[in-house]
Amino acid sequence: MDLPSFLWLWRIAAWSMGLSLTAYGVLVLTGWGLWWGRGEGRSRPQWLRPLHLGLGLTLVGLVLLLLTVGIVGTLGYYGTLGHSWHLGAGLGVVVLVLAAAATGLNLHRWPRGRSLHITINSLLLLGFVAVSLSGWTVVQKYLPGFPGATP
């Protein structure tokens, strides 16, 4: 398949990854604000929790979009999956994001799950680092004009 015709797909992936990292960063900040606001005598803004939930759901959507783009792009280029460790790193991030969403949405039923939610999101940072590093090698392999790209 002619890869330049897939350029729109790679643009979607690049924007989605950038927005995912931005959403994750803002989620960390809003999560810290929610935690800090739980302190004795402190109040938190009413808009903070809905913002945190909305950003979390946005992150889920972006990561699922990235998974779809990765599968379509790899199958379109190679015809099969599993040509680099990026697949494993990406699947790990998908699992962690879904686990973080599941624990976060159930904190009202299971308050002790808060530490699990925080742990999962800490591991997610490592997952984003891994998927970013492996993704850079994928970009170099696929896109002509990048150093180390194969035609």
Image (tube, grey):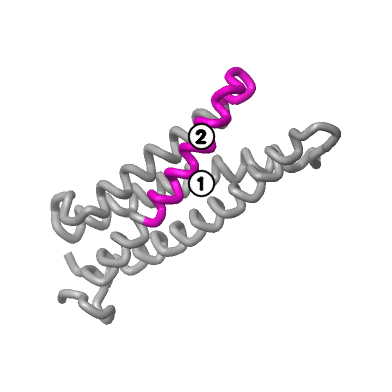
Q: Nearer the viewer, residue 138 or 31?
A: 31
Amino acid type of the residue that numbered disc 1 sits on in the rendered structure: Leu
Give the SS element for disc 1.
helix
**Residue name at image x 48 percent, y 37 percent:** 119
Q: Is residue 46 left or right of residue 141?
A: right
Number of residues whose C-alpha sits closer than 10 Å to that of mark 2, classed few (under 14), some (14–19) or many (20 or more): some
The quadrant in which the C terminus is found is: bottom left
Number of residues whose C-alpha sits closer than 10 Å to that of mark 1, classed few (under 14), some (14–19) or many (20 or more): many
Which residue was labeled with disc 2? 101
**Residue name at image x 25 percent, y 50 percent:** 87
Give the SS element for disc 2.
helix
Which residue was labeled with disc 1? 59
Q: Is residue 120 left or right of residue 140?
A: right
Residue 122 position within the rendered picture, expressed as x and y whole percent measured from the top left = 48, 44
Amino acid type of the residue that numbered disc 2 sits on in the rendered structure: Ala
| Quadrant in which residue 78 is drawn | bottom left
Query: Magenta segment, principal secondary structure?
Result: helix
Task: Please tell me the numbered disc located at residue 83.
Answer: none
Q: Is residue 146 left or right of residue 96?
A: left
The quadrant in which the N terminus is found is: bottom left
Magenta segment: 106-129
| Quadrant in which residue 146 is drawn | bottom left
Position of 54 relative to 16 (above/below) = above
| Quadrant in which residue 2 is drawn | bottom left
Q: Nearer the viewer, residue 44 or 119?
A: 119
Residue 47 position within the rendered picture, expressed as x and y whole percent measured from the top left = 76, 42
**Residue name at image x 51 percent, y 34 percent:** 101
Which comes before the other along the chain, label 2 or label 1?
1
